[in-house]
């Protein structure tokens, strides 16, 4: 009896150790061939299709091997297979945010940061925000604007497993017009000269150079600022800032090198000019109109609405020195328009991909965008589809991500209750698995 107790205690200790190692990500990091079996209480394997209850997902290394009906015994798959018990959870594919800025976050001191933030600090701070984003259930992001060396290093460090974060597709610095959104603004002349990015361009030939420059130094995506921006400290509005010939040359150059283009665009004329030029996504799309909707549908471009800043920023502007008079006026107008325009676009069948512009709002709260999409008239399923199947399509990752199906990368998350009934479940992710690696796990309470 005593001996049995001791053995039991010993077993428990070993189990605890294994559990600890799993939670801290230690076991699977070096065990690329390991097999995991997940029991999913309810599984939304393919957003857009109905969820199914009591499914088992078999993972080997970083890939999904199969999805089978019922709760299977892990030992029938492999003697060494381990079970992740999510039998009381709602399981779905890892989420994707197609508009973030991982290396920064808006604060009252944002304008002074250029004086003291080094590239290394940018990258390290980015690692901190990357982890927050990943534990919020976002296993893939598109970063649309950061100090190039910092964000490319962060992307590569995550890829190599040096730090934990979502897989990143990064643009580096924006292709933008002199004095436009994306250029340095609001400082004295000597500093503006020093801080002007290499990707600022004027005229089609110069913009061809800037596009090639961005790709040469590591950009996965080209980000352009087709119109003025809400948060740049200028009162030049939010209308078109890049000319049609510049837009056309950027698209031709990027596309000929196999790189897609995302356009920051608020004003109607800039949205429509970028769509006519063949852009792959319009980000923000604040003042889109009927003609924009027609152009979206004709070209197949995605709208990435980024509703979070409009919902959160206006109430935070008073007393915050970052919000100058010029910025306040633009932020108020943009917030008023965006929700209804997303409603119109969605109703008309424009393709929508999930994006938050996190950095403007705090990293890790990305999931709050879902409730705003639903408020704008999207169904819970359409909002989830936008952050999985649609986002994977926009990012060119459909072969590997977006659904839980055999052969795909094992990016899997879970929540306590059905997000198709309560979308705010996606603000509290209990379990995150990325590339077959357990980042965070819901321990089943018995
Ligand atoms: Zn942005």
Image (spheres, rainbow, N blue to C red):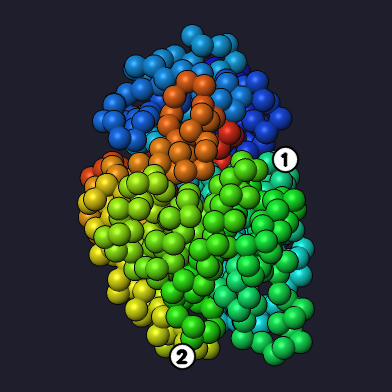
Residue 344 position (above or below residue 385):
below
State which quadrant residue 191 falls in: bottom right
Quarter of the rendering containing residue 162: top right
Q: Residue 277, position in %: x, y?
A: 48, 55
Tell how many labels.
2
Question: Where residue 414 appears, x then y in whole percent?
Answer: 41, 39
Q: Position of residue 44 (x, y in %)?
A: 34, 32
Element marked by disc 1: helix
Secondary structure beneath label 2: helix
- Say which of marks 2 and 1 sits in front: 2
Numbered circle sitting on residue 160: 1
| Residue at left offset 32%, top offset 23% | 54
Quadrant of the frame with the C terminus: top left
- Which badge, 2 or 1, comes first in the chain's sequence? 1
Image-quadrant location for residue 60: top right
Apparent side of residue 196 relative to residue 4 in the rendered image (left or right): right
Residue located 50% across and 59% down the image: 263
Q: Residue at x 40, y 41 (%)?
A: 390
Query: Is residue 125 shown above or below 232?
Result: above
Classed neighbour count for the residue bearing mark 1: other residues with Cα under 10 Å, few (<14), some (14–19), many (≥20): few
Tell me the tag on residue 304. Answer: none
The reply to whether discs 2 and 1 touch (Cβ–Cβ < 8 Å) is no
Is ligand 1 within 8 Å of the beta carbon of the residue shown at mark 1?
A: no
Identify the mark at residue 325; answer none if there is no mark.
2
Is 406 situated above or below 361?
A: above
Q: Nearer the viewer, residue 94 or 155?
A: 155
Which residue is farthest top?
Answer: 76
Label 2 – label 1 distance at C-alpha: 44 Å
Q: Is residue 19 above or below residue 194?
A: above
* Residue 216 as seen in the image, left or right of residue 168: right
Identify the residue at image location x=56%, y=11%. Answer: 78
- Quadrant in which the N terminus is drawn: top right
């Amino acid at each position: 009896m005593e001996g049995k107790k001791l053995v039991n205690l010993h077993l428990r200790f070993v189990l605890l150790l294994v559990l600890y190692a799993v939670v801290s990500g230690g076991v699977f990091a070096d065990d690329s061939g390991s097999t995991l079996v997940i029991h999913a209480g309810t599984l939304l394997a393919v957003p857009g299709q109905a969820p199914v209850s009591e499914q088992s997902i078999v993972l080997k290394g970083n890939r999904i091997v199969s999805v089978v009906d019922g709760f299977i015994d892990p030992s029938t798959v492999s003697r060494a297979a381990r079970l992740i018990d999510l039998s009381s959870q709602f399981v779905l594919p890892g989420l994707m945010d197609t508009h973030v800025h991982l290396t920064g976050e808006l604060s009252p001191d944002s304008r002074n940061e250029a004086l003291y933030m080094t590239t290394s600090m940018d990258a390290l701070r980015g690692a901190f925000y990357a982890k927050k984003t990943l534990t919020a259930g976002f296993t893939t992001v598109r970063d649309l604007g950061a100090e190039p060396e910092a964000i490319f290093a962060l992307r590569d460090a995550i890829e190599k497993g040096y730090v934990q974060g979502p897989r990143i597709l990064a643009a580096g610095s924006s292709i933008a017009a002199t004095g436009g959104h994306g250029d340095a603004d609001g400082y004295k002349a000597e500093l503006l000269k020093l801080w002007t990015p290499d990707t600022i361009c004027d005229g089609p030939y110069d913009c061809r150079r800037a596009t090639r420059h961005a790709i040469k130094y590591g950009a996965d995506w080209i980000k352009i600022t087709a119109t003025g921006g809400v948060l740049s400290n200028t009162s030049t509005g939010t209308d078109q800032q890049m000319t049609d010939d510049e837009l056309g040359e950027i698209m031709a150059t990027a596309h000929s090198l196999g790189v897609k283009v995302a356009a920051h665009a608020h004003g109607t004329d800039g949205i429509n000019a970028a769509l006519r030029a063949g852009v792959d996504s319009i980000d923000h799309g604040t003042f889109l109109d009927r003609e924009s909707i027609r152009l979206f549908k004709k070209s197949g471009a995605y709208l990435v609405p980024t509703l979070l800043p409009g919902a959160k920023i206006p109430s935070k502007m008073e007393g915050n020195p970052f919000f100058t008079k010029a910025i306040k006026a633009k932020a108020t107008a943009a917030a008023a328009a965006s929700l209804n325009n997303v409603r119109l676009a969605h109703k008309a069948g424009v393709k929508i991909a999930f994006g938050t512009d996190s950095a403007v709002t705090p990293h890790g709260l990305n999931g709050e965008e879902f409730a705003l999409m639903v408020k704008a008239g999207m169904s819970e399923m359409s909002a989830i589809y936008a952050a999985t199947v649609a986002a994977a399509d926009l990012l060119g990752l459909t072969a590997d991500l977006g659904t839980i199906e055999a052969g795909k990368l094992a990016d899997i998350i879970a929540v306590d209750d059905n997000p198709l009934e309560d979308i705010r479940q996606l603000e509290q992710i209990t379990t995150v698995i990325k590339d077959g690696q357990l980042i965070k796990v819901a321990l089943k309470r018995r």
